[in-house]
Structure formats: structure tokens, C-alpha cells
Amino acid sequence: MPDEQLPPAPDQPRIGVDEWVASVEGKRERYSGVVGRLRRVWDALPVGGRLLVFAIPAAIFPLVTTEGNLFRYGLITLIYALLALGLNIVVGFAGLLDLGYIAFFGFGAYMYGILASGHSGHHWPAELAIPVVIVGGAVLGLLVGLPSRRLVGDYLAIVTLFFGQAFVVFVNNANRINFPFVGHTDLTGGANGLDNIDPLNLFGWKVTTTKEYYYFTLGAFVLVMMLLYFVNESRTGRAWRALREDPLAAEVMSMPINRLKLMAFVFGAATAAFAGTIYGAVQTGAFPGDFDVGLLITIYAIVILGGAGSLAGVVVAAIVVNAVPELLRDPNQAEWVFYVGLTVVVLARVRPWQRLVGVVAGTIAFGFAVHAIADAAWPRLTAGSSGGEGALAHAIGSWILLPSDPKQIANFAFGLLIAAVLGLTLIDGVWRTVALVPTIYLAAFVWENLLIQQTAGATRFLLLGALLVVLMNARPQGLFGTARVEIV
């Protein structure tokens, strides 16, 4: 009796079928709809066209906003993006976990201050100071990379973290150095920082206003992005990606992995030092507290959210990471950010559409029912007022419970909300749909009675963290990153 051919297991490849080719039609189906059309247009654009998609709106932005908003939403975002480009070389291209990266940023700010400030008494023009700072940052990156080139993973992270902390200690104490034959020298101003840094003076053009600094930084960012694109497409860029994926395999393929690591450190440090030069000139000072772990976490969040190795992702992630906390400073703007964000999450994650309609309708009906019952049974639960103002806050006030003294009940509801979110991960099917309705309402209750009162403080970072968690759960590879496929 001939052996019958058994069908392959679901996780096994089909015999005689190219699985990669067979999946093309499925991939094309995902390019349907509005999002699909946008992705096809984006993929069809040349590199220059993609860059203009960002550069043109960025160039128009100063013409339609105030100087304060230009500084908060524009200039700081560009500096963050420039920093993220440098970190993307080390982490995204080469796959090296560098936790001392911000020290190179601080080095650029302090070095420029030493070359051009009233504190040092030197006033170098920018066309001389900037190249010196960039070269100095590259040399410092080389010195840090030399003892670290044989380290990987956690060991590399520990060494670079030590370097970052050593830099902070140095600038805090470098105001009382006694050099031989020179005597006492105040190099960095100590804990008070380095003040009176000169504005950029580039070939006689003194950059003084926020708009001028914005356009200078925008031009620098576009230039650095173009250079990194060509580097990434070169043999060095391909070798960096091979190093990131598997250092051992890259070494077996005769790639000089130690040299590649040093080059990544040098390129990243030079980019960070250049960003530090602009930051020092904008702030007219360099202070030790500006280069702490908090800034390092912010830049890492930009790289990871955008997608490690993605240049376009750096732009979008920098806008998200900087703009969202700034928008949340104003309770009225924060009101819109919260409810728009909550709506987007529900629309993106609840499927199919019948279930989505049921969740939305159930949440609205649940809120009005709870509000009506509480208003009739215990009027104190509806006697309070929302922290926001405007039409949205007024509409929410007739749907959500607003107690006259919400502090204790809001703190209790916050703990209950955390438990409810964790509970949603343990159930599935129709029960998750049912539980989702009171959970959404509870989130709105906590926001209106607790979090909106603290938008200038902890709430901004709490919501930013929640946003990052949601986005990274939806796309672990980042917004523009490429998903890694491991074959075992």
C-alpha cells in the first residue's frame, strides 16, 4: 500500500511552493484602502521627494506660528531629531547599545562655549568653531570606542553609561583645575554652568532670533540626513546592518567588525557634538543638568518609536515625543489630545466593525446612564466641574461624573483603572468587549477628575509613556522600522 502524502503542518513550508512569492498577494491586499494608497504613493516617491514632504511644511511653519511656539514645537524638535540621527547611527545602523551618547552632545555645547563665549574670553567665528567641535567630538567618540570595540550587549552599555556619568562629574568640577605652568583654570563653570556663550557668527551672519536659529537648524538637519542616507546606502551602511543583525556572521564574512564599531561611534559622536554646538548657542549657556539621563531616555524613545535604522521615523517620532508633552501643558489642548488619542486607539484596535460600533455606542449609553442615576441618587457626584474649558469640556461634563470633592475617589479610580487594564489582557472574546465599555468610561473619569489637573507635571509624561506603550504594542519594530524575521 503506497504511503499517503500527509499535508504539511501549519508552521511548515509547503513542498514545491515558494512561500515568499506566495505571500505577495497577501501583502498587496494590505495596501488597500486610504492607508494603502498613501503607502503606495510614499513607496513610489524618490528620496528627494520624501525629504521635501518634511522640508516644505517645516520651512512654512515659522510663517504661521508665534515665536514661543516656534521654539517649543519647532526648534527643540529639530535639535531632538538631529540628536536622534546621531544615535540612530550607533543603535539603529550598527546595533550598539550606547548609554553615554548624551555626553557627546554636552561636549559639543561646552566645547563651543570654550571657543566662543564671554566666560572664556575667546570669540571664534562659527565657521572655525563648528569644524573644531565636530572633529573634537569624533576624536572623543574614537577614544570611547577603542576600549569598547570588543564589548557587546550589557557590557558595552555599562561602559558607555559610566562614560556618560563621568562626563557629568567632570563638568561639575572642572572649574578648579590646576594645569602645569598655567595655574587655576575655570574650564566649565562648575555646577553653575558655562554662561555668555556667543550666538553663531557664520561668515559675518550673526544668528540671533529664534526664526534664524530654526532655519539654520533645519538646514543642518536636512544636510545631515542626506549624508546619512548616502552612508547608509554605501558598503559601510550595509556592513553596519550586517553587524547589527549578527556580529559573528559578519566577522565570518571577513567584515572588519571592530573598525565598523569605531566608525559608528565616530559618526554618532560627531553628529551629537554638532547638535550640542547649536544647542549651546541657542541657550547661550551649557549647564550640567541639561545632559542627564532624562534626555538620553527621550532620544532613545525617538529612535525606538520611529524604528531603529529608519531616517524617516526619526522625523515623525521627534515630532510626537516633543509635541505631545508640550500640547499637554495647556488643559484645553490636553483635553483634545486625550480624547482624540483615546478615539484613535479604539478605532485602530477594536475589530471587526460590528464590535467597534457596539463598544462606542455602549460607552456613550453607559456614561449617560451612570450620570443620570448618580445625579438622581447622589447629586454630589455631579456637582463638580471639569478642569478644561470650551465646548468639549462642557459636553463631557454632562456625560462623565464630576464629584464636588474628587480627590479620594479619583485616586481610588486610578488604581481600579490599572487593575481593569491588566484584567483586559486576561480575557478574550465577548467578555473583553463587555469589559471594554466600563474601562473606557473609567479612563475618562480618571482623566477629568485627576490627570487633567496635573497636565503641567506628571500627567504629560504618564500619557506620553502610555502612548509609547500602545504604539510599540501595535508595531514593535517602530513606526517606520522593518520587522525582523528569525528562522529557527
Image (cartoon, rainbow, N blue to C red):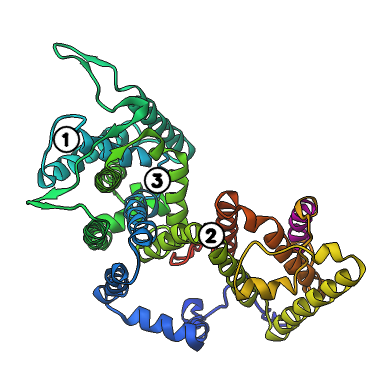
Please indicate, yes or no, whether residue 38 appears anywhere in the rendered image: yes
Amino acid found under the numbered disc labelled 2 = Leu
The residue at the far left in this view is: 203
Give SS at disc 1: helix
Residue highlighted by disc 1: 115
Amino acid found under the numbered disc labelled 1 = Leu
Q: Which mark's residue is nearer the viewer, 3 or 2?
A: 2
Amino acid found under the numbered disc labelled 3 = Leu
Residue 417, magenta (yes or no): yes
Find out whether the residues at labels 1 and 3 contact each other: C-beta distance under 8 Å.
Answer: no
Numbered badge on residue 96 = 3
Numbered badge on residue 336 = none
| Mark 1 Cα-neighbour bin, 10 Å: few <14, some 14–19, many ≥20 | many
Q: Which mark's residue is nearer the viewer, 1 or 3?
A: 1
Give SS at disc 3: loop
Residue at the image point whose x is 84% and y is 76% from the top: 369
* Nearer the observer, 22 or 86: 86
* Nearer the observer, 261 or 421: 421
* Nearer the observer, 418 or 237: 418
Residue highlighted by disc 2: 328
Q: Position of residue 327 (x, y in %)?
A: 49, 62
Majority secondary structure of magenta residues? helix
Q: Position of residue 234 (x, y in %)?
A: 23, 60
